[in-house]
Amino acid sequence: WSYALAGRGTPVISNGRLYALGYEGEGKDLQEVLVCLDARSGALIWEDRWSDFLTDIIYDRYSIGSPTIDPESGDIFVLTTAGLMRRYSPEGEIRWEVSTMEELGRLTFPNGRTGAPLIDGDLVIVHIITAHWGKVEGPARDRFYAFHKDTGDVVWWSTPGTGPKDGPYSHPVLENRGGRRLLYAGTGCGNMVCVDARTGEPVWRYRMATGGVNASPVLYGDQLIAIHGRENMDSSTIGRMLSIRLGSEAEAGGAGPLVLDESHEAWRNELGSFTSSLVLANDR
């Protein structure tokens, strides 16, 4: 079967249903749409549509993200191109919505990158570039926000990096290490960062590139392997894959984030990828 829907994210399947974020129409008539299809037949079960607002997206770069399904409830979490963070029931009812532009000072970029929310326990986590209020939240940074998945309330927010160059969509990976739940992701400031996923405390960062890191890393034993497609910090070459040794995490409550240097690299090569993420199969 086939279904006519444009988009740049990945569909997901849960309980026999396929959910996809896409868009239809052109110019002022363009609308973003979340569809729920029967995964076996492709028949439409339900959809929700909305128009863009207050963004500078170009070239129809909409729907660069995926829905995320909560394994406990079957509910669907979506971050729209316009920055609406929504929770849907399996039947398409909006349970809650947070306008990240209005409430958190989210900034928008022509590339339209949003990515997919990450669910971990009672938290749903996204990273977006914001410029909010005051000395701490005011400067533009790629920040991580953890919402309580039942209410949409912000549980914590974190600023692990520096001034961003562009908007990335590196999907975080998680692990338990040293008694802490840790989150790793690339950011719009060219860093690979580590954040405490329970408190939002920045743990460490390592500057990989001059621009945003879009690809997601993989965990391999005591190493975090990452890749990017921007100019390197120590040369004019484009792209690099590298392995960061883990184990330098400060104890909870310590002064952070720790800024890592090249001595924390286990290895590197000159492969590059701007958007496609790494996958691990056995030892490869």
Image (tube, grey):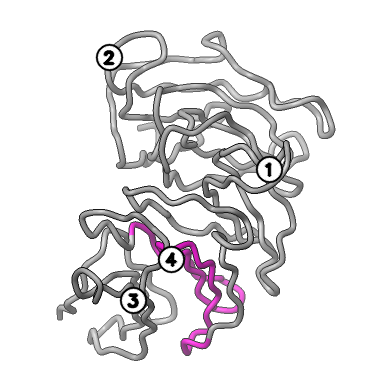
From what the image shows, is residue 17 above or below residue 236?
A: below
What residue is shown with label 4? 80
Query: What is the magenta range?
Result: 64-93
Q: Toward which corner of the image does residue 196 lie, by quadrant?
A: top right
Q: 10 Å neighbourhood of mark 2: few (<14), some, or many (≥20)?
A: few
Q: Earlier in the sequence, mark 3 or mark 2?
A: 3
Q: Earlier in the sequence, mark 4 or mark 2?
A: 4
What residue is shown with label 3? 33
Disc 2 marks a residue whose amino acid type is: Thr
Q: Nearer the viewer, mark 2 or mark 1?
A: 1
Label 3 with label 2: CB-CB less than 8 Å: no
Is the N terminus in the top left, top right, bottom left or bottom right quadrant? bottom left
- For the residues labelled 4 and 2, the Cα–Cα distance comes to 34 Å
Disc 1 marks a residue whose amino acid type is: Glu
From what the image shows, is residue 4 above or below residue 229?
A: below
Disc 3 marks a residue whose amino acid type is: Val
- For the residues labelled 1 and 4, the Cα–Cα distance comes to 22 Å
From what the image shows, is residue 252 above or below residue 19?
A: above
Q: Residue furthest right?
A: 253
What label does residue 118 carry, if any? none
Is the C terminus in the top left, top right, bottom left or bottom right quadrant? top left
Secondary structure of the residue carrying tag 4 is loop
Q: Earlier in the sequence, mark 2 or mark 1?
A: 1
